[in-house]
Amino acid sequence: MQTHYIYFLSSFIFACGGTTSNEEIDHFDQAIDTIEETAIDTLKAEVIAIPNEIAELLKNFRDTFELPLTVDSTFIQERNDGDQLESSQFNYQTVRDLIQNGFANGPAEEQKYMLNATIEIDSLKSINAYEDYLSSIDIGMLQDVVYNGHGIIIFPNNRHLLIWTMNYSSYEACPYYTGTVVFGTLLDRYQIMNTIELAEITSSGNPPAFGETAADSEVSEDKITTKYREAYGETADPEYGYEGSLEESDSKHIVFIDSTGFAEKMIDN
């Protein structure tokens, strides 16, 4: 960069014809010094120190994903391997840090209740009170949860997307609920912003009623498009007079990325 500036200035001075005075040379040297100082200041301004707590957080996210990225059922299945899940687990305190600034899109907002419930379970594990909890668990209660960090997407302008999952299951009786949800938490210049839901495979039921939700996302450089598919109804059971029913709905959420985090939301049903 400095070479180009020097070439331009020297070409300008000597192209004007004739010799140059000592005063002109001094002026030229001062201009070069100014350019060098400006360039160095610019480079320094782009170097962002990573806070210690963020550096520790980033250790949970080993892989780097390239854009564009599809986060769907295949993405989930490839990362639900037992050994990989065990090696990438983190605890409830990390989750609290990741979701400290809330959620961006509607369906992710609905995960608040489940996340808060799972955080309570994981905190019991941290104080060795989980076995006591299991001894008193009853129908409809959350049984287990595991959080895993998977990887990072690097965006322009010093932004990063941390991709992580929550796997949960209820007591093995009716009513029941179970599933995997993939989240993305945005960092802007190594500051935690907000969180979005990227994918989901969840189900629940209390026979004959049932419900299922699936979601997947396409992540690009400036936006994330998430499609949701919900199905709910009743299973057929002639013995109890249930004829069976099924209702389905689809929605699409487009969330844009800027310095405020996941910003504008546009919903297309």
Image (cartoon, grey):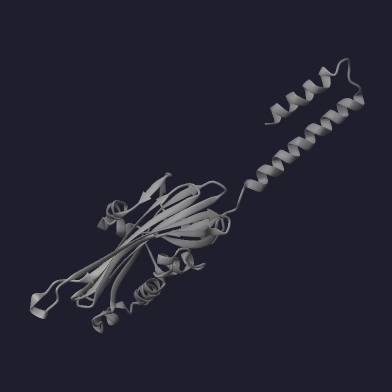
Q: Residue furthest bottom?
A: 136
Residue 59: horizontal and vertical position, in percent?
A: 44, 55
x, y (%) of residue 115? 39, 71
Identity of the residue drawn at 23% across and 81% down: 139
Front position in the image: 15 or 220: 220
Residue 261 visible in the shown view: yes
Residue 222 position, x and y percent, is 50, 49
Q: Residue most toward the top?
A: 18
Q: Residue at x 33, y 77 (%)?
A: 128
In terms of image quadrants, where is residue 122?
bottom left
- Is 12 positioned to the left or the right of 242 in the image? right
Q: Please state which of residues 194 and 42 is positioned toward the viewer in this rendering.
A: 194
> Above or below — where is 108 with respect to 140?
above
Image quarter in which the N terminus is found:
top right
**Quarter of the C terminus within the rendering:** bottom left
Q: Is residue 69 left or right of residue 180?
A: right
Residue 163: name its quadrant. bottom left
> Can you see residue 60?
no
Residue at image x 73%, y 24%? Answer: 7
Residue located at (28% from left, 82% from top): 132
Q: Is residue 154 above or below residue 131?
A: above
The x and y percentages for residue 44 are: 67, 46
Q: Is residue 234 left or right of residue 129?
A: left
- In the image, residue 100 sits, relative to residue 39, either above or below, namely below
- Count how many numbered circles sit on residues in the image: 0
The answer to which quarter of the image holds residue 28 is: top right
